[in-house]
Every structure is written in structure tokens, then in C-alpha cells.
């Protein structure tokens, strides 16, 4: 790094960590940073017209690649514009590394134009928020931020980079960031305890979230569900955690009101929770959500989520893929013939009920197919016949989302992304990020009139950077 300043050092650090895109909306103090980009053609700057779009496009890219993704924004007004999108990224566990500009440490006592406590602004909507105060620690802090963003529970971080720090000579060595392994598994005795509880269940239930997708545990989850004959419900999920076409997959619990989810969560006598928390509605049930006397087992890499709202009988902080795979092996070994037959009978019953429900939904859809304006169910029925098999959908259709998966049930991970976190506007920029990560695939973005209102300017970025995703507006 001899004779190079900090702005060059951070770009070389990004390249060392395999980062190829920066999503941003720059301001005056970032001009030198942008000039430095000319020296690194392997780093592509995705220009957006507003900070919300930058964060949400990066969110889509991060979800599609499962890699740390850089967002570059301006100082106080820029960070202020990004807060809502950062909240969404935090709730959705996107590993974003947000770098923000500032006029300089030497000006902080002046309370000048655009001054503000940037670290405090970002703290509530990030995993970690900091400012580099000393040029000799620039890369050390940046590597720490990248590591924090990508270590479960993953999530956005914010690093303020004052202009005078970036103008100072770089003295640190550029080296790849160190990432700790989280592929951990509990002891045999703990898993046998959980397997024994599940094997004895008369009505086992499974509730999952994106921790399953993060660890790549979809096949293992399906195996456990089949062994138990258990309904599988998603809660706080935006990835493909189980094939939508699987007969045991039931969809998602309620989004807004806890009393809508309660009839589902109170069905079982033994509840297996994995990679999520219970429950994420806007107005959750404050009392007990399980049936009286029912047991709960919770597997998650995020210890904070275990027993966060409701007590569990067995909490396990471990990798879902390794844990569920071992749990399946133990279940297969200890389940009696009678228990296996009961599981098969439950599977048959659940399958038949799902088929009947699906036929009823199709009949309701056909009743409005000739209505004007066009009903989304008719649109999706037609679109599904035109899409290539490996098409990817980024879904912010919200109230129309059930029709999306009804006519295009996703079976492969990485081919369906649902909005997470509650804020509007991710449908168009999220699809752009996914398209940049999958340039050879058809990407469809679905949004509503409200969501489009917030981020319609994202279409400019799609055109500028030739991110040829297709967007549909539903209302």
C-alpha cells in the first residue's frame, strides 16, 4: 500500500474479499472515493437515485449470493434516507456492509452543515455501527465489519469513513477477512432427548424460518417432516426453506394478527421450531401460543431467538443442517413400527387436505378470472406457463403473494425471495440486485402500487446498468 491513501486501500480490501459490486448514492465528500474506483475495473458501482434503492438493491443481491455486499451512502441526510431500508435488512438478516461518508474528523467539533451523530443514527438498525477514527486502523475496522455482517445471525453493519481518514496514507496490509465457522452440532444425548419427544408425538408440528435456508437444510427438513408426518409452517421467512410443492408444506403463519396464527400454533403436542422465532406478527399473541401441556424444541444458530417470546423445553444453539440431519438419523433408529405407521397416516391425511384446499382456491380464482381490472391469479396462471424452469421471482405482491406461489410453486432454493422486514418498496430494487447476481436467468419482480411509489426510480438504475429484470405492478 506504499504511496496509496485509504480510499484505495478499502477498494483493494473489498476485492480481496471477493466483492464485485458497490451499490450507492454518493455525495460531495465521496468524490475522491469515486475517482479511486477508476483504478479498479473489477469493482462495479451500481448508481441509484436515492439511498433506499441502493440498500434494497444490495439486499436483493446479498440474498441471492449469500455474500457480504457493500452499500455506499452520503453523510447525515444520506444515512437518514437509508434508515427504513436498513431496518428491513436487519430484520431480514442481510449481510450488508454500509460505508458512509463524513466531511472529516477535524470538523466534528464545528457542528457544521450535515453534521450529526452518524454512529448513533445507524445503531438501532444495524448489527454494529462504528466510525474509523484513526487511519492506521482503517482496514482492521473494515474487516471486523465484514466479519460481523456475515457471522450468524447475519445482518447489516455501518462504518463511517471520514474524508480525512480516506485521504491519509494507508499503512495496513490488505488481506482477506477471516470468517469463523458456525457449523456446530449438539451432543448426542441432547439430540436423543429431542428425538424421543418428537417420536412420541401424536400431532407433531414444525415451524421454520430462513435459518433453514441459510444453512442449506431444506432436504434435511423435508426428511424429518416425512419421518414424523408433521405439517411444516413458515414464520418470519423470505427464502425457500421447503419446496412449496411438498405435501407437508403448509405456507406461512399470520403476518399481522396473532389470533390468526393461534389456531395453527395450538394444534400440536410437540412443536419443532428451527431457524426462526415465534411469532413475528405485527400484533402478536401475548399469551401462550401452544396447546396446554405441549412441548417445544428450538434449533437455531441465533441464541437470542430461542425462547425469546415463549418458553421451550429444549433449546439447541447449533447449525440447522447438521443438527436436523443427525436428528433424522436418530428418529429413524428409535421410532417404533407403530409410530412410523402413525406418521404415514398423518402424511396421507395432510396431503389430502392440502389437495382439497388447493382445489378450493383454484375454484375461487376462476370465479374472478374474467373480472376487470385483471385479477393477479389470472395473471399468474398465464405467466407461469411462459416462464423458464429456472426463473427467479422476487415477491413484494403482499396480499397477492398467495396467488404467486399457487401458480408458480418454487421447488429449488435461490429461486424465490419474499419481502422481509415490513417496509415497502423492495420489489423493484430487490429484483435488480437478484438479476445482477444471476445475469443468465429470468428474474421477475412483483410489487404493489404502494411499494412502487417508494422506489419507482429504481427503474432508472435497471436501465443504466442493463439489469434486465421484469417488474409487474399488482394492487
Image: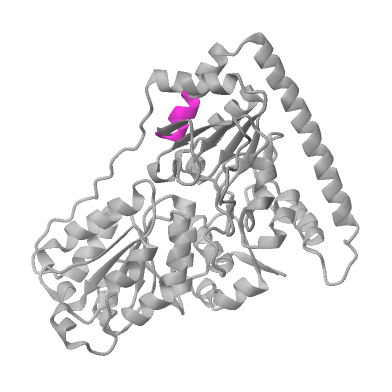
- Which image quadrant: the C terminus? bottom right
Q: From the viewer's perspective, is 19 left or right of 425?
A: left
Q: Please state the horizontal and vertical placement of residue 102, each as a whole percent of the image.
A: 25, 78
Query: Residue 376, percent across and down?
Result: 77, 62
User: What colouring style does the render use?
Assistant: one colour
Q: Is residue 345 toward the left or the right of residue 430 in the image? A: right
Residue 108: image location, x then y, percent: 18, 81
Q: Quadrant of the N terminus?
A: bottom left
Q: Is residue 464 above or below residue 149?
A: below
Residue stretch in magenta: 317-326
Q: Residue at x 49, y 35 (%)?
A: 312
- Report x, y in % for residue 278: 54, 45
Q: Quick check: 209 left or right of 129? A: right
Residue drawn at x 67%, y 51% is 259
Taking the magenta stretch, the answer to whether it contains residue 319 is yes
- Quarter of image, res 358: top right
Answer above or below: position of 373 versus 359.
below
Q: In the image, is residue 280 part of the stretch drawn in magenta?
A: no
Residue 315 in sight in this render: yes
Look at 66% across and 48% down and name the residue there: 261
Q: Is residue 37 visible?
A: no
**For residue 121, side relative to residue 191 (left or right):** left
Q: Specify the principal SS of the magenta part.
A: helix
Residue 272 versus residue 127 in the image, above or below: above
Amino acid at each position: 500500500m506504499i504511496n496509496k491513501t485509504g480510499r484505495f486501500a478499502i477498494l483493494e480490501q473489498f476485492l480481496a474479499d471477493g466483492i464485485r459490486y458497490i451499490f450507492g448514492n454518493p455525495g460531495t465528500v465521496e468524490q475522491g472515493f469515486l475517482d479511486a474506483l477508476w483504478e479498479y475495473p473489477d469493482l462495479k458501482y451500481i448508481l441509484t437515485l436515492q439511498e433506499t434503492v441502493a440498500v434494497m438493491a444490495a439486499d436483493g443481491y446479498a440474498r441471492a449470493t449469500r455474500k457480504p455486499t457493500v452499500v455506499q451512502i452520503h453523510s447525515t441526510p444520506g444515512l437518514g434516507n437509508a434508515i427504513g431500508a436498513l431496518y428491513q435488512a436487519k430484520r431480514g438478516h442481510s449481510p450488508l456492509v454500509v460505508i458512509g461518508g463524513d466531511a472529516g474528523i477535524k470538523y466534528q467539533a464545528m457542528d457544521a452543515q450535515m453534521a450529526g451523530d452518524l454512529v448513533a443514527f445507524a445503531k438501532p438498525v444495524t448489527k454494529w455501527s462504528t466510525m474509523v477514527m484513526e487511519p492506521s486502523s482503517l482496514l482492521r475496522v473494515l474487516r471486523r465489519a465484514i466479519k460481523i455482517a456475515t457471522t450468524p445471525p447475519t445482518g447489516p453493519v455501518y462504518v463511517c469513513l471520514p474524508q480525512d481518514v480516506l485521504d491519509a496514507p494507508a499503512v495496513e496490509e490488505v488481506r482477506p477477512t477471516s470468517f469463523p465457522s458456525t457449523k456446530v452440532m449438539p451432543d448426542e444425548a441432547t439430540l436423543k432427548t429431542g428425538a424421543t419427544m418428537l417420536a412420541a408425538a401424536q400431532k407433531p408440528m414444525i415451524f421454520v424460518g430462513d435459518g433453514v435456508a441459510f444453512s442449506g437444510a431444506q432436504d434435511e427438513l423435508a426428511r424429518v417432516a416425512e419421518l414424523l408426518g408433521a405439517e411444516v409452517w413458515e414464520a418470519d421467512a423470505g427464502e425457500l426453506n421447503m419446496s412449496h410443492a411438498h405435501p407437508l408444506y403448509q405456507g406461512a403463519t399470520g403476518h399481522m394478527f396473532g389470533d390468526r396464527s393461534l389456531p395453527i400454533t395450538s394444534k400440536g403436542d410437540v412443536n419443532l421450531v428451527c431457524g426462526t422465532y415465534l411469532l413475528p406478527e405485527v400484533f402478536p399473541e401475548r399469551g401462550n401460543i401452544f396447546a396446554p401441556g405441549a412441548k417445544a424444541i428450538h434449533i437455531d444458530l441465533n441464541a437470542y431467538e430461542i425462547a425469546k417470546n415463549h418458553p421451550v423445553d429444549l433449546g439447541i444453539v447449533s447449525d440447522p443442517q447438521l443438527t436436523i440431519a443427525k436428528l433424522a438419523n436418530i428418529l429413524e433408529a428409535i421410532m417404533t413400527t407403530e409410530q412410523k405407521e402413525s406418521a404415514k397416516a398423518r402424511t396421507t391425511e395432510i396431503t389430502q387436505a392440502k389437495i382439497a384446499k388447493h382445489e378450493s382456491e383454484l375454484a375461487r380464482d376462476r370465479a374472478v378470472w374474467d373480472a376487470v381490472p385483471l385479477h393477479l391469479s389470472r395473471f399468474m396462471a398465464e405467466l407461469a406457463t411462459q416462464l423458464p424452469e429456472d426463473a427467479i421471482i422476487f415477491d413484494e405482491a403482499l396480499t397477492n403473494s398467495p396467488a404467486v406461489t399457487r401458480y408458480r410453486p418454487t421447488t429449488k432454493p435461490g429461486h424465490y425471495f419474499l419481502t422481509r422486514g415490513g417496509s415497502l418498496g423492495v420489489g423493484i430494487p430487490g429484483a435488480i440486485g437478484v438479476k445482477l447476481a444471476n445475469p443468465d436467468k429470468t428474474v421477475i419482480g412483483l410489487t404493489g402500487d404502494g411499494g412502487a411509489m417508494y422506489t419507482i426510480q429504481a427503474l432508472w438504475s435497471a436501465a443504466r446498468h442493463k439489469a434486465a429484470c421484469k417488474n409487474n405492478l399488482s394492487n
